[in-house]
Image (spheres, helix red, strand yellow):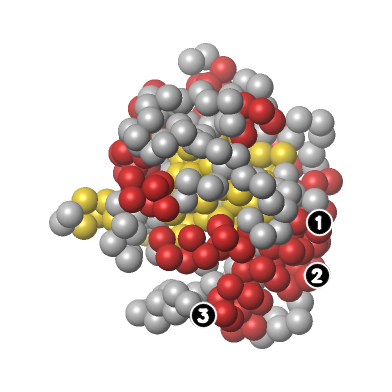
Amino acid sequence: MSQPTHPPPDTHETSGEHNWVRERFPKGLLLADGATGTMLQAKGLGPGEPPDLWNLTRPKAVQEVHEAYLAVGCDLVQTNTFGANPLRLTERGLSGQTAAINLTAVRLAREGCTAGHLVAGTVGPTGDFEGGRHRSVSTETRSAFEEQLSYLMHGGVDLILVESMTHLAEARMALQAAQECPPVPVAVSLVFFEQREGLLTLDGASAQEAVRELTTAQVVGCNCMHVEHVIEVLRQMREVTSLPLIGQPHAGLPESRGKKWVYPLDPEAMVRHIPALLASNPGILGGCCGTTPAHLEAVARSLRHS
C-alpha cells in the first residue's frame, strides 16, 4: 500500500494534510470505546476463558457490548479480537478457528453501527515476546499477524488497531505486516512502563523513539496505562510528530473490595483528566481495562462542553 508522506519527526505541527482522522472524521476527534473483556466478565466470562471465543458461542453478548458503547456516543468500536491471532488461539485449544472468530467479530461490531461509526480491527501481542523469548525475527510471529490481519481486512474493518504492544520490535513487525495488506489504515498503540530512566517499553524504547520507528502508521499512541502516564506519553509523542495520536488509559489496577474486584478510576475521576489529555491534540481517545460505557458517556459529555 502506498503510504502517506508525513512531516519529519522534529516537526511541531498538529494538523497536516495527511491527518487520517480529520480526513475520515471532520470534527477531528474520534471517541473510541472502552474495555471489552471487563464488560464480558460482567456478563459471565469466566477466569481463563478466551473472550474471543464468545464471538462464536455468545455472539449476542458481544454485540450488546458494542451497542452499549455506541449508545453513549462512541464513534469507533473495536472488534473482540485482542487474542485472536493463530498463536494465541492454538495455545487455548482453538486451532483452526482463526478465520471464524475474526470474521464473526467484525460482523458483530459492524451490525450495531450506523453511518459515521467506524470499526477498528483489534490486534494484540502474539505472546512470542513474553517471558524473555523476544523472537523478534520469528517468521511464525509474522505469519500469525498476517493471517489475523487478512481476516480482519476481509471482514471490512475501517482501521487496524495494533494495541497493547509492550515491545517496540513486535509493534514494528505488526505494522509492517498490516501495511502489506492494503488498503486499511493502521494505528499502533504501545504500553510504556515506569522505569528509572522514564516511561519505556519492555525492550527499552521511549515514547519519542517509538514514534520515530513507527512513522509509517496513520495513528500512534499508547493504551492500558494509568491516565497520568498516558498524558505524559502523548505529550512526549506530540513534541516529535504531527501524526494523529491515540490514548486509551485503563481505570487503574483492580482492587479487592469485599467479594468484588473494582477499578478505582470512576467515570467522573476520568473526566477530570480530559483537559490534560486534550492538551496533546489527540485524534482518538478511548478507554482500556476497567473502563465501561459509563466512563465513555462521561467523557463524551465532557467533550461536548469543552
Task: Tell me the mark number nearer the camera, choosing from 1 and 3.
Answer: 3
From the image, state whether disc 1 or disc 2 is nearer to you: 1
- In whole angstroms, how far apart are the C-alphas of marks 1 and 2? 10 Å
Taking the image as drawn, is residue 221 in sight?
yes
User: Which residue corresponds to the image point at 62% horizontal and 45% vertical from the top-left?
Assistant: 3
Identify the residue under disc 2.
100
Identified by mark 3, the residue type is Ser
- The residue shown at (57%, 60%) is 176
**Where 273 sits versus 153, above or below?**
above
The Cα–Cα distance between marks 2 and 3, rounded to whole angstroms, is 25 Å
Q: Earlier in the sequence, mark 2 or mark 3?
A: 2
Q: CA distance from mark 1 to mark 3?
A: 26 Å
Marker disc for residue 5: none
Q: Nearer the viewer, mark 2 or mark 3?
A: 3
Residue 155 numbered mark, or none: 1
Residue 129, quarter of the rendered image: bottom left
The answer to which image quadrant residue 197 occupies is bottom left
The numbered dot on residue 138 is 3
